Amino acid sequence: MSSSSEKNQPPKTSSQYAILEKNVLDFWQQAQIFEKSVDRLAPKGDYVFYDGPPFATGTPHYGHLVASIMKDVVPRYYTMQGYKVERRWGWDCHGLPIENIVEKELGTKQKKDIEALGVGKFNELCRSKVMTYADEWEKVINRLGRWVDIKNSYRTMDLDFMESVWWVFKELWDKDLIYQAYRSMHICPRCETTLSQSEVSEGYRDIKDFSVIAKFELVAEPGTYVLAWTTTPWTLIGNVALAVGSEIEYLKVKSDNQIYIIAKERLADVFKDKEQAILASLRGSDLVGKSYQPLFDYYASDKTLENRENGWKIYAADFVTTEEGTGVVHIAPAFGEDDMRLGKEQNLPFIQHVGLDGHFSEVVTDFPNMHVKPLDDHMATDINIIKYLAAHNTLFHKEKYEHSYPHCWRCDTPLINYATSSWFVRVTKIKEQLLANAQKINWFPEHIKEGRFGNWLEGARDWSISRQRFWASAIPIWECACGERQVIGSVSELEELSGQKITDIHKDVVDDITFACQKCQGKMQRIPDVLDCWFESGSMPYAQLHYPFENKDKLENNFPAQFIAEGLDQTRAWFYYLHVIAGGIKNSQAFDNVIVNGIVLAEDGKKMSKRLQNYPDPSLIMEKYSADALRLQLLASPVMAAENLNFSEKGTEESLRKNIILLLNVFNFYELYAQENKDLDLSGDKLRAFVQTSEHVLDKWIMTQFNLLLETIQAGMESYNLPRATRPITTFIDGFSTWYLRRSRDRFKSEDIKDRQLALLTTKVILLEFSKVIAPFMPFMAEHLWQKLSTNNFNNDNASVHLEAWPSVFEIEPKDVLERMIFTSQIVEAGLMKRNEAGIKIRQRLNKITVRFKVTNLEPAYQNLITDELNVNEMELLPPLGDEVFAVELDTKITPELKQEGIKRDLIRFINLLRKEAGLSLGDKTKTFIVGHEDVQIVVKKFQDELIKETLSESVEIVAAVEDDVAQKTVTIDEQKVTIALVRV
Ligand SMILES: [Zn+2]
Ligand SMILES: [Zn+2]
């Protein structure tokens, strides 16, 4: 085999199941089965799948495995249905995650440090780190059995990809869907960049802050203070107005010899421990227009401040409520959306006393160079502000306040609400068509469609796409001092304009590329911003194909994708951005079907944490229990339906036991008898045709069960409900093993050749067809079984279960076989319970079971199953007595004949056990010797022929003693010791 075998060499601790899978992996690689499954003729055409690119900033965790399993099962299934399913891996290379890793290594504290180092150097470092974990990813994904083309993966940092991103940008620009605006938005003061709505929504955490109620003294009424509440004391320096509700009732109250103004509804809360006397009641409109003394004079004293004459007055605003605070809102237009809007409406002064880096400006002399949210102590600056207020008699009250506050999703710094300039995609303009297109998407689970996704779309705002960072796609807007702007949509366009050969379009390169302004012949220079990396992952359908510069037909014939899958967190991220961009440039949805997975938690229900080591390494789990066991465990779980799963290793072990071990047992049993009965073998169409003629109820039953299984899996797959498609697999294996095979055991040894052949070949055909059905779910076990059963045995490079077509149903007349079998097993269950109650072992034959039920014509075939299974001589079926529905009576009297039967069965069992222990196979004949009490001696004589036949002995004799050097064992039969010995002949 090729050198790939070395790569798949499992560690020494691998279980036999992992070794089996390793052999399969080697075969797939060496015979290039994945490539063949994609390249061969596909009668049904393309089935298009888009892979969401992961950030390779760490090794893959369970969440990635869950996503990879979904992305493997569905394409494998549709391949078997006759489609061509290309699967191309992608890497998300840009953005803060990778910048943060490099910054940590460099030890940079702020953005200035990067600029000092040089953007080119910084980007080079980022580029060198991007693929750090790629090999580890490839190893794990390959071991999981996921088929995906990683070698030809697309990378968001490649020139082709970035060029298509520019094209997408220009398409949106040409449709007037991109604009620049000065807006109040959330920024990260450490990363010094704006963030999008979804990035902000991801980072909400509860933190403690100080809230304060500040006193604003009315200019015309010294000694009278309006009270206003804030949870961001540092914004008080930027205060330029107070807002009241014009219809709200306010009170003038006296307390501690000072006079306060507060909303009536807030009085009890705010003055809860203070004595107070109400002096007057007034409407908010009565307060409007009054001037108050600024808390700080850094800006108020500046005579050149624009709109200064409108500042530090009371205004009416409709967003004021009396739900919390004092019913009066402090207005700082640079630090809040409502504030900014009111500032614009009323022409208020605009005070930006904080830089994008979070530091106070030089004007704020009492708090030199302080940061509004210091990383080591986020309340420190607020405390300084509070001290200042207290010293100037403008503090009414302070207290600790816990609230949900957004943090940077990458560096964890508390964000600040900040008015700044940003570029936006005009999502609100196309919202109606986005909503209409979203109706065409099929979600699993379905509730996401109108719920999480629908709601998010419904509340969509314009998307802030500009970042003031470095390692990303550059925004392709060039501008001139005269106001002229030009958007570049391709590399060749820029080459033509600049007269330069261009091989890279990252910020550090294109920032230096200029060209002449068409209007004034001045210099056109790129704006400094880069793109939100979600813009790139949302552009992947086009950019992975370098569309429209290449693959024009390929994209246009294959859009939108049939299938994508990711975690719940992507509802507001990748799913959303794919949808927005496709809506913007093609007025279409980007995907037709989507599966959303939930979160894999540790066994204790907590988040999986590397630090706490509260979960087992997925690679070790696969080595111990096999990848198939893990796949099936996750596939059958609610994590495939956007719910949480508490992962337990016991669950993987159970999955191994119930699926793989049980199935291998069935296969091994079949193999044993297939070796003995080679003359009865059939294959291909003949095999199916022969088995379909069987009249045996067990054969009919297992084929009917298979038909049902096939239908259930198809229905599950077509609705993208993976748990529904997966769970019946385990049930089928259980029925196959513990009912069909157990009840058919004697048929495998039957004198009746036709019956022996039917049992053998039904087992074979079911195993063969079942291996195809499980191929998408348990690709390793499927391949192993199919290779052995088809006798290709890994020797034919063009034969694999994954190149087979999806099986069809057996053509049999099921009649009422399922109903009858359910009735049969109910009787067996009830009979076993009766045995249990009477304390009689199953090996002790009993005389009779009586069943009372409305059905009184159960065919002998079923009756035989019941008497065999319950080890009774006969069964009687009678109509029910009175109003009972179903009753079972077991005759528990043990006659001497029945006792002898029991001894005979014990002897057969122990002799065969000893044969197995002695390592004998079906072809080995023995002489059997027995030393035992009188009852045993009688049984040996009476049932000699049967004992010889059932134990493959040449003779069975009673002896007085056995030699020490022969294979032997001493057991208890009928409460006395019996010794059994074997001599091979
Ligand atoms: Zn940050
Ligand atoms: Zn110009």
Image (cartoon, rainbow, N blue to C red):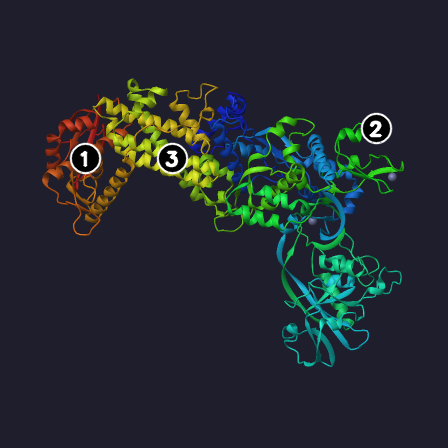
Amino acid at the residue labelled 1: Arg
Can you identify the residue that label 3 sits on?
Answer: 709
Alpha carbon distance from label 2 to label 1: 95 Å
In this rendering, is residue 703 above or below 352?
A: above
Q: Is residue 766 visible?
A: yes
Is label 3 or label 1 in front? Answer: 3
From the Cβ of disc 2, is ligand 2 less than 8 Å away?
no
Alpha carbon distance from label 3 to label 2: 65 Å
Ligand 2 is in which quadrant of the figure?
Answer: top right
Q: Is residue 357 visible?
A: no
Discs 2, 1 touching: Cβ within 8 Å: no
Instruction: Indicate the position of residue 761 as horizontal and vertical percent values.
Output: 31, 24
> In this image, 494 relative to 647: left or right?
right
Amino acid at the residue labelled 2: Gly
> SS at mark 1?
helix
Amino acid at the residue labelled 3: Leu
User: Image quadrant of residue 173?
Assistant: top right
Who comes first in sequence, dot 2 or dot 1? 2
514 vs 404, nearest the viewer:
514
Can you identify the residue that label 1 sits on?
Answer: 905
Discs 3, 1 touching: Cβ within 8 Å: no
Instruction: Indicate the position of residue 451 as horizontal and vertical percent values.
Output: 55, 49
Alpha carbon distance from label 3 to label 1: 36 Å
885 vs 645, nearest the viewer:
885
Can you identify the residue that label 2 sits on?
Answer: 499
User: Image quadrant of residue 521?
Assistant: top right
Who comes first in sequence, dot 3 or dot 2? 2
User: Image quadrant of residue 940?
Assistant: top left
